[in-house]
């Protein structure tokens, strides 16, 4: 005989409370394990594909590990130093850019912006503030990241956890399945499948879209000679998970820098604008439909809310679990709403009439 619903709610509520208490108390300590689990989850389809083509799980894990190490080494040696260098240069160049913008506006609209106008002073002050505070912010972020993800965590614990979890992923899923309450196992499996579909569509799909577009923007902007092209591409790719925001922010930043750098040389400015137009066409017509699909069910506003709330409550580790929790809550809310619409509470007398008609 199954437990009453009230008793089940007590057990499940207690388990959820224990999880959030542990997350709040041991967030920093659990961080490498959440990172390792996230990496293993992201790479599990690759391991499954290799297994389907004749590799054992151990061989597939080894191949993925070697490939990941090579990509990481190239990224650390080539990309990160250039990204940091361009970011610092952009912050330092902000006063000059603001001054040039002010000069341009003064020349074109002398009645609006004279040398002593409030808007001119605001532009100059904004450039100086970005130069002073931007460098401090970048240094603080790098220092905080270094203190949060120390060398041992970053280079030893996270990869080890990811490798072991990737190797044992299928066995762990099977073990968890055996622990499910027998009366509710079919429903839990259905909900878990929908949650996995939602997370896979968003995390793996949008992650691939962001990486692809960020790489495309960075390489294309650097090829046309735009200064700080790598930074602009990184920002545009990072914000792509919010529809249109990545292209709008990255495009505005890139075109603004192009106007400052290539003023009067209109073909190069048009080339910068064309890069983002091509990126938007590729994203809307190919990348997002193919890699993410239309049935993800994770609205950007819901995702931003989850990231904000979990980040404020649990720090960086909270942001890692925000997407799975948002996906899970979204699926559960849809399930509860569907159950409600099929219940007598929602249908009322109509349900009784349907029963009598059927009878």
Image (spheres, grey):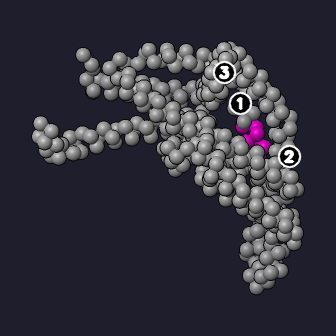
Principal secondary structure, stretch drawn in magenta:
helix
Q: Which residue is mark 1?
A: 149
Query: Which badge, 2 or 3, is on the more N-terminal residue?
Result: 3
The answer to which image quadrant residue 113 occupies is: bottom right
Q: Which mark is residue 85?
A: 2
Q: Residue furthest bottom?
A: 111
Residue 291 horizontal/vertical position (percent): 61, 41
Q: Is residue 14 left or right of residue 148?
A: left
Q: CA distance from mark 1 to mark 3?
A: 36 Å
Closer to the eye: label 1 or 3:
3
Inspect the magenta stretch and tell me whether residue 101 lies in it: no
Mark sitting earlier along the chain (2/1): 2
Q: Is residue 260 positioned above or below 236 on the image? A: below
Q: Give the side of residue 6 with respect to residue 143, left or right.
A: left
Q: Residues within 10 Å of mark 2 (few under 14, many from 20)?
A: few
- State the residue position of label 3: 53
Q: Is residue 55 left or right of residue 256?
A: left
Disc 2 vs disc 1: which is toward the camera? 2
């Amino acid at each position: 005989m199954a437990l009453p619903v009230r008793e089940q709610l007590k057990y499940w509520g207690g388990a959820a409370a224990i999880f959030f208490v542990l997350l709040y108390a041991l967030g920093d300590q659990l961080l490498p394990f959440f990172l390792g689990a996230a990496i293993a989850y992201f790479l599990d389809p690759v391991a499954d594909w290799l297994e389907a083509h004749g590799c054992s799980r151990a061989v597939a894990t080894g191949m993925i590990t070697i490939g990941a190490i090579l990509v990481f080494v190239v990224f650390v040696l080539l990309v990160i130093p250039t990204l940091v260098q361009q970011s610092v240069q952009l912050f330092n160049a902000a006063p000059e850019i603001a001054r040039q913008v002010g000069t341009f506006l003064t020349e074109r609209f002398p009645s609006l912006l004279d040398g002593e106008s409030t808007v001119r002073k605001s532009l100059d002050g904004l450039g100086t503030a970005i130069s002073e505070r931007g460098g401090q912010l970048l240094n603080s972020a790098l220092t905080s990241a270094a203190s949060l993800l120390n060398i041992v965590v970053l280079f030893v614990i996270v990869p080890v956890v990811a490798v072991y979890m990737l190797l044992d992923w299928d066995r762990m899923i099977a073990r968890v399945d055996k622990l499910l309450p027998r009366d509710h196992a079919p429903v839990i499996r259905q909900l878990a499948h929908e949650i996995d579909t939602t997370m896979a569509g968003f995390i793996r799909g949008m992650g691939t879209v962001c990486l692809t577009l960020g790489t495309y923007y960075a390489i294309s902007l650097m090829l046309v000679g735009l200064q700080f092209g790598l930074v602009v591409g990184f920002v545009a790719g990072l914000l792509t998970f919010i529809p249109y925001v990545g292209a709008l922010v990255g495009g505005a930043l890139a075109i603004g820098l192009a106007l400052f750098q290539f003023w009067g040389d209109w073909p190069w400015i048009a080339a910068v604008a064309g890069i983002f137009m091509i990126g938007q066409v590729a994203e809307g017509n190919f990348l997002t439909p193919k890699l993410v699909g239309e049935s993800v069910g994770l609205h950007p506003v819901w995702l931003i809310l989850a990231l904000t709330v979990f980040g404020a409550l649990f720090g960086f580790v909270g942001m890692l679990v925000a997407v799975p929790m948002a996906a899970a809550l979204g699926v559960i809310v849809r399930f509860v709403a569907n159950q409600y619409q099929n219940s007598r509470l929602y249908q009322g007398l109509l349900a009784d009439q349907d029963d009598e008609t059927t009878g």
